[in-house]
Amino acid sequence: MKAFKIPKSTYYYWKNHRITARDKQNITLRREILVTWKQSRHVYGYPRIHKALSDKGFNVSAKRVWNLMHSMNIHSVMNKKYRKPSTHNDYAQRDNLVHKDWHAAWCADITYIPLLNHQWVYLASVYNPTKHKVVAHQVCNEMTAELVTRTMKKAVQNTKKPIFLHSDMGSQYTSNQFETLLTNLNIKHSYSLKGHPYDNTYIENFHSMLKRELVFQTKFESIEEVIASIDWYVRWYNKERISLVQST
């Protein structure tokens, strides 16, 4: 013990220590936590990992999962923000037809994604709030009426149309091209109040989540890399990502 420069108490604790059932379970839990965390590309924090373990039959508390993750020095990916270009429009306010009753409505929005060369590309999405699913998405290097129109056309190809489509008052969504499409589809257009993005909370939340879990963690060199990554994320979000809310 003198040769190794360790106290006698440490040596005797090691000599007499026996692995308990809890110790054995922690070994298994750490392995499962690490696998689940890596499969989520480091997205999941302890609430979703706790749910994943419960779904696999592990009777373990959320606090214990948090403690184990803390001991392993793993956590959900962290946020960072960037400054996006400002936009405005001169249209008069139009009606909000949804008023938080989303059972017959989809929502749509555009978000910005930066490239390493400091240019921007744009993601247009259509979202089903009652199913918590992305119905359609498109990435383009220009933020145009054609982008949102093409995304909406894709959204209605293989699924039942909604009664309402809710969006903000951005010039792309108030364009004649987009409004004509909705009229031809017999879909009523609902609008967020200017300066109130949370009127469109579901898709705002989705885009915010996508940025925290993917975009802020990735350095994109080209639009092709953005398209591939967003395609993966949407498939994963729609089919595999553990949700803490229930679809209606």
Image (cartoon, rainbow, N blue to C red):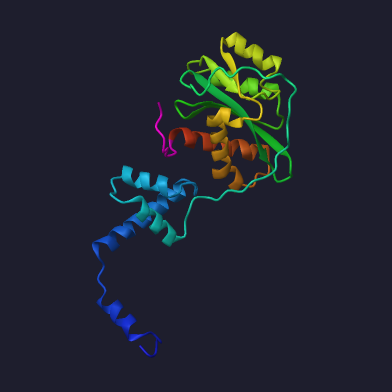
Give the dominant element type of the magenta stretch: helix, strand or loop.
loop
Does 35 appear above or below 176?
Answer: below
The quarter of the displayed image where residue 26 is located: bottom left
Q: Position of residue 94 (x, y in %)?
A: 65, 17
Q: Position of residue 185 (x, y in %)?
A: 57, 11
Q: Is residue 158 magenta?
A: no
* Residue at figure coordinates x 73%, y 40% from the top left: 119
**Quarter of the image that includes the N terminus:** bottom left
User: Which residues fall within the magenta stretch?
Assistant: 240-248
**Quarter of the image that includes the C terminus:** top left
From the viewer's perspective, is 87 left or right of 231?
Answer: right
Q: Position of residue 16 (x, y in %)?
A: 25, 77
In front: 150, or 208? 208
Residue situated furthest bottom in the rendering: 2
Q: Is residue 241 magenta?
A: yes
Q: Position of residue 81 (x, y in %)?
A: 64, 46
In front: 167, or 223? 167
In front: 151, or 182? 182
* Residue at figure coordinates x 56%, y 17% from the top left: 97
From the viewer's perspective, is 216 left or right of 6?
Answer: right
The quarter of the displayed image where residue 66 is located: bottom left
Mark count: 0
